[in-house]
Image: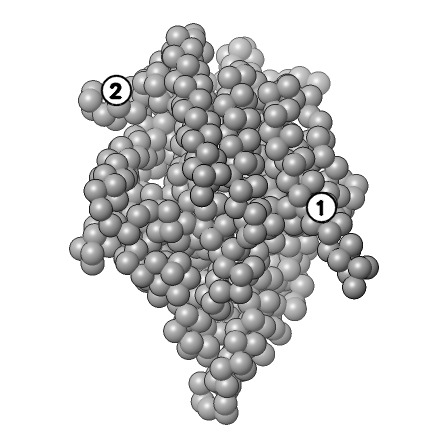
């Protein structure tokens, strides 16, 4: 029970850290020229299309929405398994040196690792979850999700693959023992 | 709660219907072909080639599934091609929201083990389907996949009700609605037969004989070369080296948050400046998957969980076999299991009662209201500007302006088809081509290399010729009218060659996109 409570505190702290990173990144993003430029482009399109309701236009074209879009892009990009296993294939990112962090042949081990985490090992699932949140907090600070940005996330993926490998090893070991 | 479900359906319907008759963003060639054939069937009982009641509609070198065309006939005959076809699609899209909600209602109690959250799971599932930009965008256009999703949802409802014969008949119908279902529905049929056999539901009755006959006919049609023309042209499994790696990477990409949120790179297949799915929908999907997989592993699973997972696994397969990064239309059938699984995920996460639940729900309603405003803004303002070219925007105006010309004054009227060889279908619709004028074709059901008609006679008697316009050569043609994109003409040379820009069509940014150019009446030399 005590251990579970500890894990919850760590998970809470990780979430707070993620929220702080999101907040800091938002503040940084809303000041960027590219964000302001995007808002102007949205406003221009609203003008060209002739759908101008001032209150709604402001609500749907503002720098906070543009910043949220950018953070969302970074989040989904850093959580994309295709980047780790296939070097981004089939959606390679322009301007990024794509790199296969984990050989794609290890996908079955990754899936087994996920299954084990989901079904059996609650404590390990919490730990991996905390690792995932921290890796996300690290990644979203990068303007471009480069390999450097996702190294912690790759470590999380590796740990899941390791879980799968351990599970298979134990299964074979038990079989041989019998 | 029924009122909440009705409100979600009404809002979902509004997203799908408001502004669909607007041609600011154009009417794509595939839609035009479907709509014109529906009109042709209504007026003449045959398609544009004169084929009576086809079982597959020959179109642009492939064959379109027939069900949407036949389904669109009543509304096309009543409201015209554009509104009729798009309203048909929007109606199926809206009905899918209600049906998917009913399916979620049937299965969530058995799956989530959270009886008290059953209604909530249903409403969240409906909200995901109703608010999904992916499904909204495709429901607003005459796209076959929307009807296929409706039918596949109906088959899931029948499976949940253990009405296996009806499920098999609906699955058969779904194969006539969209190409990708031709390959996944037969696998689902085997699963349904297995369930029916396990329940002892297979017996000799009129219903089962009808099912057997339908599927015998269906298999005979599905095996024909014309049924598989589309698949043969898009299958690229071995295109880039290792086919296992190719298919696996694409398959996984359909489950990855990046693909699900960012969506299709093609502007037509998404709403400009809006996600494919909102991130909370994808998050709920992963939570739901964890719940279902945990149930499966702990052997607490029900047949509904198995059905959902199987449908999800199958729905991605045809799209991933084509190795495109993410194809919103081909993968649309996965919207149904995705929304139900997401509903299950949230119903599992939310507390059963108390202040926290009420607070979360209030927050959810505010979020949905904000997203509703965002969706309408993106559809009506951003999409109409950003996706103008992708939807061949402004072409209806171009045809109207061309038809207003006095054709007797010109030697010929040439329409450029360089970038879009199938553009003649837009002239059939907007040019009000008489459906009794059929295009000649040899051996209708034999796939062969395609080329569109060389010319059409429009509703006002004007004859237009279709071919690529190449101005350096065409400047020599005297007293001819050339219709095409601005990029096909060298404006300085048009002036130099004595040509005149008779009319033009601009995009919302006031830039010319389409031109109607008349060449000089005095012979000029072509530029070599």
Q: Is residue B324 left or right of residue B47?
A: right
Both on one chain, marks 2 and 1?
A: yes
Residue B303 position (above or below residue B378): below
Label 2 resides on the chain identified as: A
The color scheme shown is: one colour
**What residue occupies the far bottom of the structure in this picture?**
B204
Query: Mark 2 and mark 1: span between their CA atoms?
Result: 54 Å
**Quadrant location, the C terminus of chain B:** top right
- Residue at numbered disc 1: A166
Q: Residue at x 64, y 19 (%)?
A: A148
Q: Residue at x 75, y 43 (%)?
A: A105
Q: Residue at x 51, y 17 (%)?
A: A141
Per the image, label 1 sits on a secondary structure element best described as helix
Q: Where does the image place residue B360, in percent across and percent down from the top left? A: 27, 40
**Residue B518 rendering spot, x and y as whole percentages:** 47, 24
Residue for badge 2 = A58
Q: Quadrant of the N terminus of chain B?
A: bottom left
Identify whether B124 is placed above or below B370: below
Q: Out of B221 and A112, give the one closest to the viewer.
A: A112
Residue for point 57% across, 41% down: A124
Ranked by sequence position, the earlier of labels 2 and 1 is: 2
- How many neighbours does mark 1 have within 10 angstroms: few (below 14), some (14-19), or many (20 or more)? some
Task: Give B325 or B74, whichever is nearer the viewer.
Answer: B325
Q: Position of residue B251 (x, y in %)?
A: 62, 47
Q: Marks 2 and 1: which is nearer the front?
A: 1
Q: Using the rendered image of the protein, determine whether residue B100 is visible from the camera's viewpoint.
A: yes
B15 left or right, relative to B141:
left
Q: Secondary structure at mark 2?
A: helix
**Relative to residue B178, is residue B241 depicted above or below?**
above
Q: Nearer the viewer, residue B256 or B497?
A: B256
């Amino acid at each position: 029970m005590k251990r579970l409570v500890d894990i919850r505190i760590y998970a809470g702290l990780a979430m707070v850290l993620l929220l702080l990173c999101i907040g800091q990144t938002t503040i940084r993003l809303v000041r960027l020229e590219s964000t302001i430029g995007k808002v102007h482009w949205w406003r221009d399109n609203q003008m060209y299309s002739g759908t101008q309701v001032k209150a709604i236009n402001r609500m749907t074209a503002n720098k906070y929405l543009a910043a949220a879009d950018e953070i969302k892009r970074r989040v989904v990009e850093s959580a994309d398994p295709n980047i780790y296993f296939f070097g981004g294939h089939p959606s390679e990112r322009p301007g990024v040196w794509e790199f296969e962090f984990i050989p794609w042949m290890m996908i079955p081990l990754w899936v087994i690792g996920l299954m084990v985490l989901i079904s059996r090992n609650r404590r390990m699932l919490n730990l991996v979850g905390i690792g995932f949140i921290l890796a996300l907090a690290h990644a979203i600070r990068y303007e471009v999700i480069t390999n450097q940005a996702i190294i912690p996330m790759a470590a999380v993926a590796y740990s899941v693959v390791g879980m799968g490998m351990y599970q298979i090893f134990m299964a074979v070991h038990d079989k041989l023992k019998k | 709660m029924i009122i909440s479900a009705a409100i979600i359906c009404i809002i979902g319907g509004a997203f799908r219907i408001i502004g669909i008759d607007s041609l600011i963003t154009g009417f794509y060639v595939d839609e035009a072909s479907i709509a014109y054939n529906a009109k042709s069937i209504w007026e003449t009982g045959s398609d544009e080639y004169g084929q009576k009641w086809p079982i597959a509609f020959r179109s642009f070198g492939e064959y379109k599934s027939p069900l949407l065309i036949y389904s669109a006939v009543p509304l096309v005959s009543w409201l015209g091609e554009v509104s009729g076809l798009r309203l048909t699609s929007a109606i199926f899209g809206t009905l899918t929201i209600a049906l998917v909600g009913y399916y979620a209602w049937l299965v969530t109690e058995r799956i989530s083990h959270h009886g008290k959250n059953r209604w909530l799971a249903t409403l969240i599932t409906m909200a995901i389907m109703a608010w999904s930009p992916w499904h909204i965008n495709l429901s607003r256009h005459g796209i076959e996949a929307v009807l296929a999703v409706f039918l596949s949802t109906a088959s899931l409802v029948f499976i949940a009700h253990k009405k296996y014969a009806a499920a098999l008949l609906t699955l058969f119908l779904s194969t006539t609605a969209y190409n990708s279902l031709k390959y996944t529905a037969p696998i689902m049929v085997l699963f349904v037969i297995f369930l029916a056999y396990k329940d002892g539901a297979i017996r000799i009755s009129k219903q089962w004989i009808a099912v057997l006959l339908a599927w015998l006919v269906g298999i005979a049609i599905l095996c024909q070369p014309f049924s598989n023309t589309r698949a043969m042209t898009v299958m690229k499994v071995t295109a880039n080296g290792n086919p296992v790696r190719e298919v696996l990477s694409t398959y996984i990409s359909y489950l990855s948050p990046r693909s699900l949120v960012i969506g299709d790179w093609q502007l037509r297949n998404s709403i400009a400046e809006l996600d494919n799915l909102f991130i909370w929908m994808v998050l709920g999907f992963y939570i739901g998957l964890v719940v279902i997989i945990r149930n499966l592993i702990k052997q607490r699973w029900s047949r509904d969980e198995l059905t959902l997972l199987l449908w999800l696994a199958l729905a991605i397969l045809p799209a991933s076999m084509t190795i495109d990064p993410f194809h919103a239309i081909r993968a649309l059938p996965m919207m149904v299991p995705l929304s139900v699984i997401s509903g299950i995920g949230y119903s599992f996460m939310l507390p059963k009662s108390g202040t926290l639940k009420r607070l979360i729900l209030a927050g959810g309603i505010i979020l949905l209201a904000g997203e509703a405003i965002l969706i309408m803004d993106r559809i009506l303002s951003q999409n109409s500007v950003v996706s103008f070219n992708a939807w061949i925007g402004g072409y209806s105006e171009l045809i109207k302006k061309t038809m207003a010309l006095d054709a007797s004054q010109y030697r010929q009227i040439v329409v450029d088809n360089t970038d879009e060889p199938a553009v003649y279908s837009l002239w059939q619709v907007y040019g009000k081509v008489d459906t009794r004028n059929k295009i000649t074709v040899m051996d209708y059901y034999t796939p062969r290399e395609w080329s569109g008609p060389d010319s059409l006679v429009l509703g006002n008697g004007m004859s237009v010729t279709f071919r690529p316009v190449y101005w350096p050569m065409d400047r020599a043609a005297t007293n001819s009218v050339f219709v095409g994109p601005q990029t096909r003409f060298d404006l300085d040379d048009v002036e130099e060659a004595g040509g005149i820009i008779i009319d033009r069509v601009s995009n919302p940014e006031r830039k010319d996109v389409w031109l109607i150019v008349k060449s000089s009446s005095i012979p000029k030399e072509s530029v070599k």
